[in-house]
Image: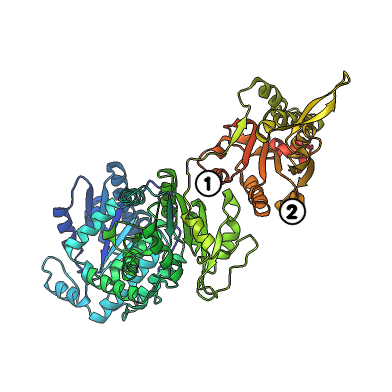
């Protein structure tokens, strides 16, 4: 007996337009017809369409079911495909949710292998599959008492083998096709419970999930005594505690029937093709529903939570929130939220942090990496909150990239995420993402990667003070520009002319640099007077940039050099430095300087400028920095992560010839550096 998992040729799922179609499977006699009749009486027929699979097959087969029984097997499969495609078509037109009863396979008692009748079209259509895992003893009794149809005699052993095989095959097939699967064991098989499940499936889409989570966050913020200026967004498992609550939950369970291939089925789930998607986390919730009813689930959560102790550093940090109304915390876990609610209760911290987590359908929440990110965005964009995110694994990276401050919690070498190093290396530096790490426990070795990941200490008073510092979220980047001035329009013309390149374009950039220096930089930095000999023979005062000799002009190579030379013409006494990378600026470069000018032709995302500003600030805490550019993208001045970080620096100003609404990064013949130096053919 074999059943091949194949990639469906149907692309409707990929298009995101697939109607919701729920399959109800189970052995003959498991109760599918009874459940279908109950659903017909309890579900809103304006929202749901219910089908008996054999009736649909009868409809699409000339001569009905009797004629179908006499067809060749390949002809039967063609009718089965036609039947499920009709269901899908009708639901697409009606926008209703469908439920269809069906058979996965037939297996006679005297045969070594059964015959799979579930088609690829079935699996390409279903979004959910419910499997009626009725006790085989009950099925045999029903088969014997069924007076409406003939049921051949069979043994308990045969039905048990049949049931296990098709249940396992369906689960595996669903996991590979983004179909939510739930095995309806005894505590889930009641008709009313199945009705609730079907209603939940109809309601709980990914968009609904996001909307509901944001609504809960809004409610949490509204209940604070004052609108928080700072919010701590904390992952749970292996972050605020060393323990993995989800893994511990599965360790407590007994699986005498070997329902799952390994002790923790989540490992199979998340390492499969679904990855860390909404579907995979929804499936994890289905698994929790399968293995425990509400009472057993609560019992397991209580037991697991009793074995978890928060890291002392996080316990102390959360306790400090009592004295600071301007800061609050949320715990956002992709795992079982109830475990962490109990952990916080046990540590008398539950009133200080709201837990956002899933684990049960009735919770109404499925926490995914992208939803974590959306919660941080909501805090920053809607509430102007300064956000600190703490996480330990790749599922936290989206959240951490959106936060103002990101802290990677690095645990013991044997338990930390093995894939995190590479993921961090890939993302550090993108859109200003520069996380730090804390090692918990303290003796744990830090992560060592090729990108900067500096150490922080949750017990360092200065670090704690930085968390509790009040933030003015309404600061904007200090920028002066000439976008609408007639002078700017004349100066920018040769820069935008595609026929001009090489020396003529460098000359144009030089003119812009000199103009910006004289018109704007002098207004920002100020002037100083000095005595000079007038042409008529007497001594008078001349003017130059304030402390010009203690000014450093940095040309960001290579596109910034021509403009920087123009700035240098305006301030001839200033020092001049070429910088390809941040380390080209060293302590010696800044010694005795009071002003640094970073000059580039175009600023797109601001990542490079942020990197240079951070580096300069690490070498000199209070030196004035002026960024001079020909063009600055308007998106940088909006509420982007980079913009907020740049706005947080004191003594930082921007000067630009124009602000561009055209968010475009030049390549090849449109790359500014290539045009300046006639190297378009190299691009």
Q: Secondary structure at mark 2?
A: loop
Q: At which x and y percent is residue 238?
A: 45, 69
58 left or right of 605 in image: left
Residue at image mark 2:
586
**Relative to 63, is 507 above or below?**
above
Tell me the mark number nearer the camera, choosing from 2 and 1. 2
User: In front here: 212 or 578?
Assistant: 578
Query: Residue at the spot x=28%, y=79% of the render?
Result: 110
Q: Quadrant of the C terminus?
A: top right
In the image, farthest residue toward the top? 536
627 lies above or below 163: above
* Vertical placement of residue 531 versus 90, above or below: above
Say whether residue 564 is visible.
yes
Q: Residues within 10 Å of mark 1 (few under 14, many from 20)?
A: many
Tell me the CA gap for discs 2 and 1: 27 Å
Q: Nearer the viewer, residue 389 or 322?
A: 322
Residue beneath disc 1: 641
At which x and y percent is residue 153? 19, 77
**Left or right of 624: which side holds 347?**
left
The percent coordinates of residue 453 (x first, y second) are 60, 61
- Asked whether 388 or 499 is in front, the reply is 388
Image-quadrant location for residue 286: bottom left
Identity of the residue furthest to the right in this view? 537
Percent position (x, y) of residue 139? Answer: 19, 73
Q: Quadrant of the N terminus?
A: bottom left
- Residue 15 visible to the viewer: no
- Tell me the quarter of the picture where residue 123 sits: bottom left
Q: Quadrant of residue 157?
A: bottom left
Q: State how the image is colored.
A: rainbow
Q: Residue furthest front?
A: 538
């Amino acid at each position: 007996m074999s059943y091949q998992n194949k990639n469906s040729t149907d692309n409707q799922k990929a298009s995101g337009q697939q109607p919701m179609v729920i399959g109800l499977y189970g052995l003959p006699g498991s109760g599918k017809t009874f459940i279908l009749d109950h659903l017909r009486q309890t579900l809103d027929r304006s929202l749901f369409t219910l089908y008996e699979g054999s009736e649909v097959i009868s409809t699409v087969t000339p001569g009905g079911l009797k004629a179908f029984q006499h067809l060749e097997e390949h002809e039967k499969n063609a009718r089965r495909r036609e039947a499920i495609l009709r269901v899908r078509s009708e639901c697409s037109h009606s926008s209703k949710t469908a439920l269809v009863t069906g058979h996965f396979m037939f297996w006679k008692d005297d045969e070594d292998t059964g015959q799979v009748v579930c088609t690829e079209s079935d699996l390409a259509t279903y979004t959910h599959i419910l499997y009626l895992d009725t006790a085989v003893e009950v099925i045999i009794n029903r088969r014997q008492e069924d007076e409406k149809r003939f049921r051949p005699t069979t043994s308990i052993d045969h039905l048990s083998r049949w049931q296990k095989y098709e249940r396992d095959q369906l689960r595996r097939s669903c996991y590979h096709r983004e179909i939510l699967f739930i095995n309806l064991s005894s505590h889930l098989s009641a008709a009313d419970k199945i009705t609730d499940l079907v209603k939940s499936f109809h309601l709980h889409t990914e968009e609904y999930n996001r909307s509901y989570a944001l609504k809960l966050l809004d409610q949490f913020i509204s209940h604070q005594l004052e609108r928080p200026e700072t919010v701590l967004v904390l992952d749970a498992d292996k972050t605020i505690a060393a323990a993995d609550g989800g893994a511990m939950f599965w360790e407590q369970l007994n699986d005498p029937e070997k329902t799952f291939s390994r002790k923790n089925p989540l490992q199979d789930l998340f390492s499969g093709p679904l990855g860390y998607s909404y579907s995979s986390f929804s499936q994890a919730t289905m698994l929790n529903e399968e293995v425990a009813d509400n009472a057993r689930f609560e019992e397991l959560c209580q037991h697991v939570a009793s074995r978890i102790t928060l890291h002392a550093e996080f316990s102390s940090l959360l306790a400090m929130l009592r004295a600071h109304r301007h800061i609050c915390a949320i715990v956002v876990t992709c795992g079982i939220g109830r475990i962490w609610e109990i952990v916080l209760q046990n540590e008398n911290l539950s009133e200080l942090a709201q837990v956002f987590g899933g684990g049960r359908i009735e919770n109404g929440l499925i926490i995914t990496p992208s939803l974590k990110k959306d919660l941080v965005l909501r805090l920053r964009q809607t509430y102007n909150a300064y956000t600190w995110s703490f996480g330990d694994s790749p599922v936290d990276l989206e959240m951490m990239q959106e936060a103002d401050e990101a802290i990677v919690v690095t645990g013991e070498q044997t338990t930390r995420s093995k894939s995190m190093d590479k993921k961090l290396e890939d993302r550090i530096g993108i859109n200003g993402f520069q996380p730090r790490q804390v090692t918990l426990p303290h003796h744990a070795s830090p992560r060592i990667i090729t990108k900067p990941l500096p150490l922080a200490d949750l017990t360092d008073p200065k670090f704690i003070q930085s968390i509790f510092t009040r933030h003015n979220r309404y600061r904007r980047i200090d920028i002066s520009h000439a976008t609408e001035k007639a002078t700017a329009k004349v100066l920018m013309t040769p820069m935008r002319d595609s026929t001009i390149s090489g020396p003529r374009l460098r000359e144009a950039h030089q003119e812009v640099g000199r103009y910006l220096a004289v018109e704007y930089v002098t207004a920002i930095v100020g002037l100083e007077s000095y005595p000079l000999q007038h042409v008529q023979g007497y001594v008078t005062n001349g003017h130059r940039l304030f402390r010009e000799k203690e000014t450093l002009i940095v040309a960001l190579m290579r596109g910034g050099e021509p403009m920087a030379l123009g700035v240098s013409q305006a301030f001839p006494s200033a020092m001049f430095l070429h910088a390809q990378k941040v380390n080209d600026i060293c302590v010696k470069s800044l010694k005795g300087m009071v002003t640094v000018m970073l000059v580039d032709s175009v600023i797109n995302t601001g990542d490079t400028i942020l990197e240079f500003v951070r580096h300069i600030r690490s070498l000199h805490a209070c030196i004035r920095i002026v960024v001079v550019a020909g063009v600055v993208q308007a998106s940088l001045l909006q509420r982007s992560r980079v913009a907020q970080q740049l706005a947080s620096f004191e003594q930082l100003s921007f000067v630009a010839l124009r602000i561009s609404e055209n968010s475009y990064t030049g390549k090849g013949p449109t790359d500014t550096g290539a045009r300046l130096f006639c190297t378009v053919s190299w691009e």
